[in-house]
Amino acid sequence: MNLKLLPVISVKTSFSGNATIKNGTKTIAGNAFAYCNNLTGVTIPNGVVSIGIQAFRCCYGLKSVTIPNTVKHIDDLVFYECTSLKNIVIPNNVTHLGDGVFEYCYNLESATLSSNITKIGDNLFNCCKKLTAITIPSGVTNIGDFAFYYCESLTSIVIPDKVTSI
């Protein structure tokens, strides 16, 4: 059996400022930047295909993230409780967006989702108190439990006809 090891990244919680992940990185490991309270921005390079579980969990100062079109998989709770995050764009190559990815991102105002996801996971936007509107991509067939729970500013949601389970 041939196993190919892919470069991954993980950093100390004391990291602060903006992070530019080096070229050649394929995977951002689970918990890679978790609890980096002073991390303010992240630029993810082309070539990264997967962002692991809780990779940026509780990065309270995180304000901006640039995700390239090469990313296909965003695991559960990746941006959980990133309370300074206001806007996010999930590129169209993403086919898997895990559960609770933006849970407790209290200040998230807008999110653009990949047109290639088929499921809105459980708790995806749970407690995103400032989220005002969302358009669910046309290919989505399932909206998970508590996906929009406690989104107290949400005034507009467009649900496609293909959704068969909410």
Image: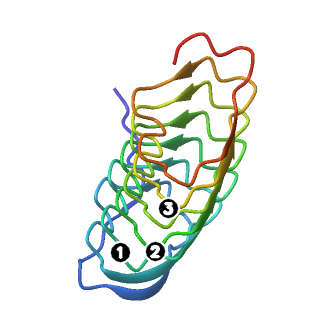
Q: Marks 1 and 2: CB-CB under 8 Å? A: yes
Q: Is residue 88 left or right of residue 148?
A: right
Helix, strand or loop at mark 2: loop
Element type where label 3 sits in the image: loop
Residue in the image at 46% along x and 35% along y: 147
Q: Name the amino acid type tagged 2.
A: Ser
Q: Residue furthest top?
A: 164
Q: Please state the horizontal and vertical placement of residue 154, each as a whole percent of the image.
A: 59, 49
Residue type marked 3: Thr
Residue type at tag 1: Tyr
Residue 8 falls left or right of residue 130 = left
Answer with mark 1 or mark 3, whichever residue precedes in sequence. Answer: 3
Determine contact: label 3, label 2, CB under 8 Å: no
Q: Which mark is residue 25?
A: 3
Q: Which residue is mark 1?
A: 60
The x and y percentages for residue 9 are 37, 64
Marks 3 and 2 sit apart, C-alpha to C-alpha, by 26 Å
Quadrant of the image occupied by residue 130 = bottom right
The residue wearing badge 2 is 84
Viewer-proximal residue among 36 and 111: 111
Rounded to the nearest whole Å, what is the CA distance between mark 1 and mark 2?
6 Å
* Residue pictured at 39% horizontal, 43% vertical: 100
Question: In this rendering, is residue 159 above or below 94?
Answer: above
- Taking the spot 62% from the left edge, 24% from the top edge, the residue there is 118
Tell me where residue 37 sits by quadrant: bottom left
| Above-or-below relation of 12 to 65 | below
Q: Does dot 1 land on a helix, a strand or a loop? A: loop
